Image (tube, rainbow, N blue to C red):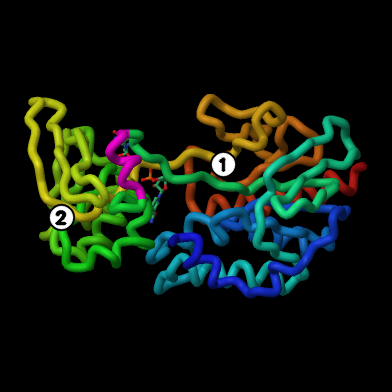
Amino acid sequence: MKNQETTKLYPLHLTKILKPMETLKTLIIGSGPAGYTAAIYAARADLKPVLYTGMEPGGQLTTTTEVDNFPGYPEGIDGPTMMVQLQQQAERFGTEVRIGFINKVEFATQKGKMHKAFTEQGTEIHAQTIIISTGATAKYLGLPSEQRLRGGGVSACAVCDGFFYKGQEVAIVGGGDTAAEEATYLAKICSKVTMLVRKDEMRASKVMQHRVTNTPNIDLRYNTEIDEVLGEQVVEGLRMKNNQTGALEEIPITGLFIAIGHKPNTEIFKGQLDMDSAGYLITKSKTTETNLPGVFASGDVQDKEYRQAVTAAGTGCMAALDAERYLQAI
Ligand code: NDP
C-alpha cells in the first residue's frame, strides 16, 4: 500500500530500459533527504550522479504528515510534497533519478578503483564513488500474533493506513516522537486511540507529549505492553499487560500501529563496510567517509543519534563534497 502510494508521485519515464553495464562518477543509493541533497550537490559539481530510489521512493518522510521543523517552511510542509520538491531540485541540476533497487555491491578496497553495484533489473554499474543514503526501516515487536496480522490490521505507518480505520477504535505502541505524532494523527480520524508505553515515561519531546495528553480521545497507558493481538484473519482486539502488576486487560480494536523505532538498511553492505552492533554504518569523525575509499554514507543509515530530516540533508551535502574532493585527489 505504502509503496504503491508513494511511487505514484514519480514520473513514469524513470522506469526506462537501462544498459546492461554503465560507468559513473557518482552513484547515490537512496532517496530520502540525505540522498536528494547529496544529488543536488553532486550534480552541481558536475559529477553527473545517478540516484536509485530504493523500495520506498522519498524515504521515511513520505510516511509523515506535517514537517514543522525543516528550516525554510514557516507554515510547515507535508512530507510527500517536500520529497517531490527535493527530487525536482536534484533533477533540475541533472541528476538522473531511477526507481529501482540496488541488491548487491562489490566495493573496491583500493583508492581510485571502480566500485560495482548491481540493480535488480540486471544492470551492472561501475562507479568511482558511491554515496549510501539507504536510511532505516520500521521495527516490529516480533510477537507471532503481530506478524500473522500484518496487512490484516497491523501496520507500521499510521499516515499510510490510518484512513482505513476511520471512526473505529485503534491502538498504537511506542513512546517516542513517531508514536506521539502518529497517535495524534490517528486521534483525528479514529474514535479512540489507546497508546501503550512500556515505561512510566515517554521518550518523545515535551511538545509532542503535551499534544498527546491534551488529546481527549487518546487513552495513554504507561507500563503497558502487548500480550497478544487478538483475531484470526483481521485484528479484533488486543490483550494488554501491565508490566508492573501483571494485570491483563482486553480491549476491542480493529487497527494496531507499531511505532517503536527503526533499523538501518545495511544488509547488502555486511562484511564490506564497518558497522556498529545495531548495523549503522560507521563514518570517520566529522566526515561521511566509510572504511573504504570512495564510499560515503549519509543520513539515518549512519546516524542513530539525531535522525532528523535536516541532519540527514546536512550529511547528504557533506557526502557529495567528500566525493568531489576524493575524485579531485585520485
Ligand atoms: P525512538 O527510538 O525515539 O522511540 C522508540 C519508542 O519505542 C520508545 O518509546 C521505546 O521505548 C519504544 N519501544 C522500542 N522497542 C519497544 C518494544 N519492543 N516494545 C514497546 N515499546 C518499544 O523512535 P522514533 O521512531 O519515535 O523516533 C526516531 C527519531 O526520529 C527520534 O530522534 C525522534 O525525535 C525523531 N522524530 C522526530 C519527529 C518530529 O520532530 N516531527 C517525528 C518522528 C520522529 P523506550 O523509551 O522504553 O526505549
Where does the C terminus fall, quadrant-wise?
top right
Q: Is mark 2 within 8 Å of ligand 1?
A: no
Q: Say few, some or many: other residues with alpha carbon within 10 Å of mark 2 (under 14 / 14 to 19 / 20 or more).
A: many
Please give the name of the residue rendered at 33% of the width and 58% of the height, measured from the top-left corner: 158
Q: Say few, some or many: other residues with alpha carbon within 10 Å of mark 1 (under 14 / 14 to 19 / 20 or more).
A: many
Could you tell which of marks 1 and 2 lies nearer the N-terminus?
2
Regarding mark 1 in the picture, which secondary structure is present there?
A: loop
Using residue 35 as the reference point, say whether residue 5 is left or right of it: left
Q: Which mark is residue 218?
A: 2
Give, as a single range, the part of the protein colored magenta.
143-150
- Can residue 138 be seen in the rendering of this structure? yes
Residue that badge 1 annotates: 265
In the figure, residue 121 lies in which quadrant? bottom right
Residue 138 in the image: x percent, y percent? 43, 45
Q: Is residue 313 above or below residue 270?
A: below
Of badges 1 and 2, nearer the viewer stands 1
* Most common SS among magenta residues: helix
Residue 178 in the image: x percent, y percent? 35, 50
